[in-house]
Image (tube, coloured by chain):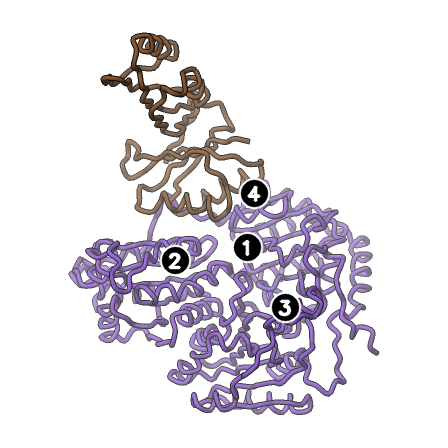
Chain colours: A brown, B purple
């Protein structure tokens, strides 16, 4: 089953490679991984999406907790939570028709056109992975020039929070 | 040297030396080189700790490891950059798999050259990452003291393990105020000590309700100094106890409640008891594959309580019913108290029946070997050694058949006396580890039981033994084969002995002699006892004993790969009168 795990870890050099090394050494999957410093710059927050049986996920969370740089973590999948991903897409638009069609499509998906070139648009869109997939699939494959996705960010719903 | 609380400007090298002194370090095992020259200069100018110069960095780390395992204090090794660090990796991985508290310092090229493929540069932090508990690269001399403090703290608390500190050369030359913190707090590292009281109560209920219980204890008991608690707990209940290879000595092997080691070369009674038990009490053990055999067939009827310091060891290989996270000594104290307060006794009728069953398995006499052979049997050598040392020697071993014979036939009655590479299985561990043990225990008998395959992997340390007058007794069980591999080839590869016969062995007596030690060769069973007596009486010198043993001897009993505890292969000698 797919799990989204949020991790607070020391913002130290090498902390990311400890997490990545753990996954490769023990043969666990990483579907996506995002990391950036938090409001407290001494800490980074990582959102990691992985797949595995309940036993594997239990081991993953235990092994992550064992890393000295990991302060605390939460398996968001255990409760209700929100996931978002950011995507930037460059699309080739050569005809007026295409421009109109893409504008409509972007409106429907509540994205934004953030750059306009002679023959291309760059679109920004956030949402769940499914929604971003749906947007990509809704346009002609030949129009797609470049797709950049951030990987998943997650946060628990309601009052519960992940703090050091 | 100033008091640690009076801050003073000093170089990184002096900070290093003073930090080690503040940690109470008495011995450092190392080998110098370019990147650690400043540190070695600072070591030259102090007399608070002794530096032991090894002949190869692997030896330094194994020696620090043996020192730590036998003394309970952290072992310290100092290596130079590049090849110094890479040579140390096998030692570090060995310590990691057996959870030994080590602090390994490596020199590094100056910070300005890091990443430039400089002379003797290697990414020591990157290379060691998968086999350390934690590691650090110190980029600023102002961080050196606190990093060393953290390294010792992490290495020695929680589940112990090796910590590597990589120190660039310029950091050892730069100056900073030296202040050594007395205590340390880390928000990201808070080892658990005390078990959860509700779980302890549930565990006590389950333990007292057992009809066919087995206590299965491991190296965690030794590491947490929980031997006394384990003995009290086991005797309070009257339950049979088996121990892993790493746990031997925590519970006295000559005690009738001890049913022998379990696992691949464990006793028939221990493995059968595991298979038939209804309640398994695992204490400081990690359900290693050499212990469990085929997982599908592991303790099919048992409810399992598992006490371990490391949550990730719990339900990793085998699902357990009641996890207890904490240190073995502390949780056992609490468990003993809860059991006493409950006022309940174990089911004595069920227990009597269970012991009756165990005694019938014991009657198999699974460790029997041919005592009338005209060739020296390795088991006989170990048995005699045990007798002549009254079980009080510190015994290190290498890896292979001799290791198993040592574990089976030297009846360890005290913890920290049996020092072997159980997890990584590192050939070459025995001799350097024995150096560390002898340095920690200068007045005790230290024996290295080895084979002619293993000893040659770190034989250069004979020179270190001479330099520091370490009177280790090397008992080499020489069968001219890589015996354990040969045994597997005999059983599972139709006797195709692919590259296991060792041709062109050196004359070990001459070799010992050339290093300035005493060499002995023993070729007949009748000479064994006399030779051992003679060697043990030599207190001032290393004695290298080359026992020419039966080339065809195998380690029995055995659980083959893919088999369960109830499917042991027993020795043919069992049929002998």
Marks 3 and 1 belong to one chain: yes
Name the residue nearer the viewer: B120 or B422.
B120
* Closer to the eye: label 4 or 2: 2
* Closer to the eye: label 1 or 4: 1
- Residue under numbered circle 2: B163
- Residue under numbered circle 4: B197
Say above or below: B123 vs B120.
above
- Look at 29% across and 8% down and name the residue there: A96
- Residue under numbered circle 1: B328
Q: Quadrant of residue B502?
A: bottom right
- Look at 41% across and 43% down and name the residue there: A19
**Where residue B360 sits in the image (x, y, percent)?**
82, 64
Name the residue nearer the viewer: B211 or B487.
B487
**Where residue B305 sits in the image (x, y, percent)?**
64, 47
What is the CA distance from the residue labelled 2 to the residue labelled 3?
32 Å
Q: Earlier in the sequence, mark 4 or mark 2?
A: 2
- Residue under numbered circle 3: B252
What is the CA distance from the residue labelled 1 to the residue labelled 4?
14 Å
User: Label 3 marks which chain's residue?
Assistant: B
Say above or below: B338 vs B531.
above
- Look at 43% across and 36% down and name the residue there: A73
Q: Quadrant of residue B404?
A: bottom right
State yes or no: discs 1 and 4 in contact (Cβ < 8 Å). no
Say above or below: B504 vs B189.
below
């Amino acid at each position: 089953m797919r799990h989204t795990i949020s991790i607070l870890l020391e913002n130290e050099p090498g902390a990311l490679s400890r997490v990545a090394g753990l996954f490769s050494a023990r043969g666990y999957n990483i579907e996506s991984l995002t990391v950036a410093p938090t409001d407290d710059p001494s800490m980074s927050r990582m959102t990691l999406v992985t797949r595995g049986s309940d036993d594997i996920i239990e081991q993953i969370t235990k092994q992550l907790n064992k890393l000295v740089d990991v302060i605390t973590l939460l398996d968001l999948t255990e409760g209700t939570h929100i996931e978002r991903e950011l995507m930037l897409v460059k699309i080739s638009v050569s005809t007026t028709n295409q421009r109109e069609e893409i504008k409509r499509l972007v409106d429907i998906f509540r994205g934004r056109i953030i750059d306009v070139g002679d023959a291309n648009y760059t679109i920004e869109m956030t949402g769940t992975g499914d929604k971003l997939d749906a947007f990509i699939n809704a346009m002609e494959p030949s129009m797609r020039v470049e797709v950049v996705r951030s990987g998943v960010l997650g946060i628990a719903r309601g009052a519960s929070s992940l703090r050091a | 040297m100033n008091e640690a609380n009076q801050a003073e400007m000093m170089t990184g090298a002096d900070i290093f030396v003073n930090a080690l002194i503040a940690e109470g370090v008495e011995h450092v095992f190392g080998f110098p080189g370019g990147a650690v020259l400043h540190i070695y200069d600072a070591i030259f100018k102090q007399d608070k700790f002794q530096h032991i110069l090894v002949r190869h960095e692997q030896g330094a780390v194994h020696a620090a490891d043996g020192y730590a395992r036998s003394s309970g204090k952290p072992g310290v090794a100092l290596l130079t950059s590049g090849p110094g660090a890479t040579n140390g990796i096998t030692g570090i991985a060995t310590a990691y798999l057996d959870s030994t508290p080590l602090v390994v310092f490596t020199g590094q090229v100056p910070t300005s050259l890091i990443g430039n493929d400089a002379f003797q540069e290697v990414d020591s932090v990157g290379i060691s990452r998968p086999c350390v508990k934690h590691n650090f690269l110190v980029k600023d001399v102002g961080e050196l003291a606190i990093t060393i403090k953290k390294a010792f703290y992490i290495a020695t608390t929680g589940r112990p393990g090796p910590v590597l500190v990589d120190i660039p050369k310029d950091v050892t030359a730069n100056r900073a105020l030296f202040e050594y913190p007395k205590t340390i707090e880390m928000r990201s590292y808070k080892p658990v000590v005390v078990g959860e009281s509700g779980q302890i109560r549930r565990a006590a209920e389950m333990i007292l309700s057992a009809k066919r219980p087995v206590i299965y204890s491991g190296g965690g008991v030794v590491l947490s100094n929980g031997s006394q608690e384990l003995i009290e707990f086991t005797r309070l209940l009257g339950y049979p106890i088996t121990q892993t290879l790493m746990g031997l000595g925590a519970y006295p092997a000559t005690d009738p409640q001890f049913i022998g080691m379990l696992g691949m070369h464990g006793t028939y009674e221990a493995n059968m008891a595991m298979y038939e038990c209804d309640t398994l009490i695992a204490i400081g053990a990690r359900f290693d594959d050499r212990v469990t055999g085929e997982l599908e067939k592991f303790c099919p009827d048992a409810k399992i309580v598992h006490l371990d310091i490391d949550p990730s060891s719990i339900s990793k290989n085998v699902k357990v019913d009641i996890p207890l996270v904490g240190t073995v000594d502390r949780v056992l104290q609490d468990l003993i108290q809860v059991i006493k307060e409950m006022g309940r006794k174990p089911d004595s009728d069920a227990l009597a029946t269970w012991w009756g069953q165990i005694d019938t398995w014991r009657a198999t006499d699974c460790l029997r070997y041919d005592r009338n052979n005209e060739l020296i049997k390795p088991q006989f050598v170990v048995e005699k050694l045990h007798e002549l040392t009254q079980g009080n020697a510190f015994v290190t071993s290498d890896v292979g058949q001799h290791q198993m014979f040592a574990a089976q036939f030297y009846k360890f009655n005290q913890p920290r006396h049996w020092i072997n590479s159980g997890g990584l299985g590192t050939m070459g561990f025995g001799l350097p580890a024995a150096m560390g043990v002898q340095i920690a225990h200068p007045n005790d008998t230290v024996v290295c039981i080895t084979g002619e395959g293993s000893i040659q992997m770190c034989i250069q340390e004979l020179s270190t033994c001479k330099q520091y007058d370490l009177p280790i007794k090397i008992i080499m069980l020489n069968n001219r084969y890589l015996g354990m591999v040969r045994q597997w080839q005999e059983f599972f590869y139709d006797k195709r002995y692919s590259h296991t016969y060792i041709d062109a062995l050196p004359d070990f007596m001459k070799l010992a002699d050339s290093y300035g030690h005493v060499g002995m060769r023993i070729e007949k069973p009748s000479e064994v006892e006399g030779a051992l007596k003679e060697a043990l009486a030599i207190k001032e010198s290393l004695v290298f004993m080359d026992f020419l043993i039966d080339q065809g001897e195998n380690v029995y009993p055995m659980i083959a790969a893919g088999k369960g505890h109830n499917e042991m292969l027993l020795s043919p000698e069992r049929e002998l009168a």
